[in-house]
Image: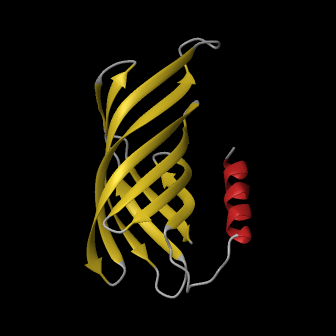
Amino acid sequence: MKKFFLLAVMAVLTALPMSKAEAQNWGVGLVGGFDYGLQVKKYMGANNLDFRGHLHNSGFQVAGLYEWNYGLGSGFTLYYGVGAGLGAWNGDGDSDMAFGLDIEGIVGVEWKIPSVPLALSLDYRPAFEILPTTGFYAKGFAFGVKYLF
């Protein structure tokens, strides 16, 4: 599955134009750390929409986050936000399937590399699980690489 995601991202990156003169309102890339997966980010000035699809353990999760930005200078941006995640994974038995719903927070820093359409990010995304049980889920840090277009 990791190879599939890597090949999919590489295919998208090679198909996109590499012109720096165009507005860079979108970012597509890979995130890794506690979870690994794909990220699509819509840049909207002072705010972002951040969509992620992650594989972890024996399942997957999709999440959508609304983020606020604070420019730090030299291409660095601090971002923080909230959103929700929905996941599915193998349950206790071999044929059992479990579903989950959570409310997520995010805080991180992103660096848009000057003169190339790439951004690097490091963020922390804790969650409060609503289903199937309730409780705080610390998750962990994630590193991301995005192509900007």
- 138 up-or-down from 142: above or below: above
Residue 20: image location, x then y, percent: 56, 85
Q: By what rule are the colours in the image chosen? A: secondary structure
Residue at image location 46% in from the left, 80% down from the top: 113
Residue at image location 37% in from the left, 41% down from the top: 139
Residue at image location 45% in from the left, 46% down from the top: 34
- 137 up-or-down from 40: above or below: above
Asked where in the image residue 134 lies, by quadrant, the reply is top left
Give the tally of numbered discs.
Answer: 0
Q: Is 101 on the left-hand or right-hand side of 10? A: left
Residue 99: image location, x then y, percent: 49, 22
Viewer-closest of 123 and 27: 27
Residue 29: image location, x then y, percent: 57, 61
Q: Is 57 on the left-hand or right-hand side of 124? A: right
Q: Quadrant of the C terminus?
A: bottom right
Residue at image location 40% in from the left, 18% down from the top: 132
- 24 up-or-down from 137: above or below: below
- 66 up-or-down from 42: above or below: above
Q: Quadrant of the N terminus?
A: top right
Residue 76: image location, x then y, percent: 34, 76
